[in-house]
Image (cartoon, helix red, strand yellow):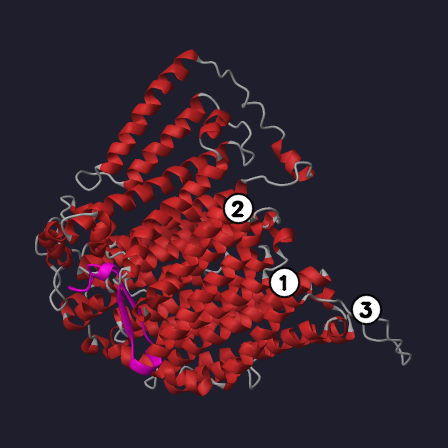
Amino acid sequence: MSEQLPAIIVLAPMFGSLLIALVGIKEQRVCLPIVVASILASLFSTIAVAQQVFTSGPIDYFMGGWEEPLGIGIHLRVDELNALILVVIGIVALLVASFSVGRMGRENGDKAPQFYILYLLLCTGLFGITITADAFNLFVLIEVSSLTSYGLVAMGSNRRGTHAAFNYVIMGTVGASFYLIGVGYLYMKTGSLNMIDIRNVLNNNAAIAESNAIIISFLFILVGIWIKMAFFPLNGWLPNAYSYCPSTSACILAPLMTKVSVYVMIRAMLTIFGFDWIFSYPFWSDLVVWLAVIAILAGSIFALAQREIKKMLSYLIIAEVGYMVGGAWLGDSGGWGVTGAIYHILADAMMTLCLFIAAGIFARSFNAIHISDLEGLFKKSPWVAAGFVIGALAMIGVPPTCGFFSKFYLVRGGIDAGHWEYVAALLISSLVNAILFFRIFEIAHFGNKPPEGHGHHAEEVTPVKGSWNSSAPLLLSAAGIILLGLFNGQIVELIRIAVDDIPSLSANLKF
Amino acid sequence: MLSKVFATIAVVITGGLLLFGVYDFPSFGDPNSPPNAGAEGGGESVSQYFITHTYKDTKVPNLVTAVLADYRGYDTMFETVVVFAAGIAIFCIMRVVGNANDPRQKKEREGMHSFTYGDHNRIIIGTTCRVIVPIIQLFGLYVIAHGHYSPGGGFQGGVLLGASFILLALSSDLNSALKRFSEYNYFKLAAVGILIYAGFGLTSQFLGENFLDYGVLQPLLFTDGPEMARSHSMLGVEIGVAFTVMAIMFSIYANLASQGTLKDGL
């Protein structure tokens, strides 16, 4: 049974969505239990698989039992790198599912079963992207996750959401096509779709590895994934799509879609092409770090200019994507940059989840769309405020939250690699985050207007009763932020194993 | 204007890069190219393996179907899921449900009646379609059932079956097609299609092998060997694919043609 777990991670949400399509459309009551049960099944399998991986090394699973020769079937592989990300996807999906309770009727009308079908298929796609070791299978699952996310963005009652979804469809399709073209070129030169097989060819055959077609395939894969992760200046679709969609959709998409795309980039760099090959062409590594610097600064500056809470958070995501891309491309000899980038995938998933759940609660319970609407938040609802503050502090990078440690590793990588511009951009962006969030704290605590004179007549504030099914996920994600920060040593150790192992992986792949 | 200039520059750069890469490709039809013979330094060639082993492994003469439905069956299952997700997404965006008195929805529905009440008693069109629809459906069934012997398979057959329902809706009206194939039924059928596909995989998991390893289904399918079990299972999953594709094709048409009301439409 335990050897079937890698398949169950991907398949459990898919079967859940089919069950909803069969019985949930008539009986809407059963939808949520099915969603929670299938995500729990995935989450338990991910945890079991992760434990196995951490104790005894990577696990391979071959669909249909087609093992030899490598590449005829589809190969799933869990190593230290994606085991961590699988667990985070499972946790985020579970928290958002519990956040969605009670929101369905208001946000999605009578389409709750369809919403949950798309939601579970999105989880299937994300799990599948993360677990696969086949370059083409990755494309198929990108399709699954993209199509479902277009639907999730467009289905709100907000017409601007539908319009944003259209932009997202166009950009997302371009990105996926670029990725597919890249994989096609790669297949043309190496004759294989299996990541490890491709890597073997590139390692052992210098004539192929140095050919122009491989360089161009790498460029297309990279740009395709950049569009998917909204790397500046390819970010046009993201802010509107995440601000105007139903808040449940925003809560699942914002933490996971961009982060899983960053994972795909790191996977392509580490496993398919290999750091040795990439950094043998120094011109583009410096260029990408500069692009990341621009992305960080642009994301922060645009975030400063926003008045809507969700828009501001969306631009912060763009800045965070810059952190991760820059970190992965630092190319320092100790590997701290890429370690920090991978740790930041986990940290940013939790931080973004926390902040977007908070924004969803603000929009629902306080009718607060703009930052200035948050007046008196701390008194009205201290628990929601506490969760939001922890998320905000993590975004700024205050210890002991995970945001501090990821920045610490990224800065260390930047210093080791001598990319001072990246270090400076990280610090400036932290400062901007501090300004942004302390402005919100000020409004939330003192109100928009400064108190006049000494007669500070505190107005009676009626506490807003938030429902526990929305504030519990918020507080749990805040707890996740702190736990991730406290256990950063152990997590980084696991990431180090992956980063050190994967370059030599072709030598020690065992069946 | 400026955006057009930028777009042109982007297109030229992208196209130029692609052509530059093509220049590096092995020549067309080269039997020693990496996709055909494997690359030096890599493992055994995948295409050579397919050509030499497919019939031995699966007893399916059509290599493409065997690669699609067996060796890479996991991909094909998710391609079917993509189709399903597209249908559900279009339902979510287009379909008008719930409060019929909602002023916004009412306004949207106005102005679309001009073309809907045409003359539906068109004798020539009606009669021709009545004759053609069963033939299309029969051909669709043939394409599905013969997928592992000749070009064809679940996707193509499913499209043909879906097209036959669309033709029915075009020649008479949407309601008479929906009477035969209601919304509740087509979403159910779409889910059943994927469930058939994934069910083959799940059954082989229960019998102790990996997902979609059809060989172990031999005792359930009463075949002479695991190879024939693979062949029969491929037919089974093709049928599942056809169900989903047919249902989703028609659902997308119905939603788009009636702007989500499923009332009269084109």
Q: Position of residue A58 (x, y in %)?
A: 29, 76
Seen at 53% across and 59% down, the residue is: A33
Region in magenta = A53-79
Can residue A300 be spotted in the picture? no
Q: CA distance from mark 1 to mark 2?
A: 26 Å
Q: Amino acid at mark 2?
A: Ile
Sooner in the amino-acid sequence: mark 1 or mark 2: 2
Other-residue count near label 3 (Cα within 10 Å), few / some / many at <14 / 14–19 / ≥20: few
Q: What's the chain of the residue with tag 1?
A: A
Secondary structure under badge 1?
Answer: helix
Seen at 41% across and 43% down, the residue is: B190
Question: Label 2: which residue?
Answer: A25
> In this rendering, do the residues under marks 1 and 2 share a single chain?
yes
Q: How many marks?
A: 3
Q: Amino acid at mark 3?
A: Thr
Q: Nearer the viewer, residue A144 or A336?
A: A144
Whether pointer 1 and pointer 3 mark residues with C-beta atoms closer than 8 Å, the reply is no
Using the image, tell me which numbered label, if any, was put on residue A462: 3
Whether pointer 1 and pointer 2 mark residues with C-beta atoms closer than 8 Å, the reply is no
Q: Relative to A173, does residue A76 appear above or below in the rendering?
A: below
Q: CA distance from mark 3 to mark 2?
A: 40 Å
Would you identify the image quadrant in which residue B131 lies? Answer: top left
Whether pointer 3 and pointer 2 mark residues with C-beta atoms closer than 8 Å, the reply is no
Q: Relative to B14, does residue B101 appear above or below in the rendering?
A: above
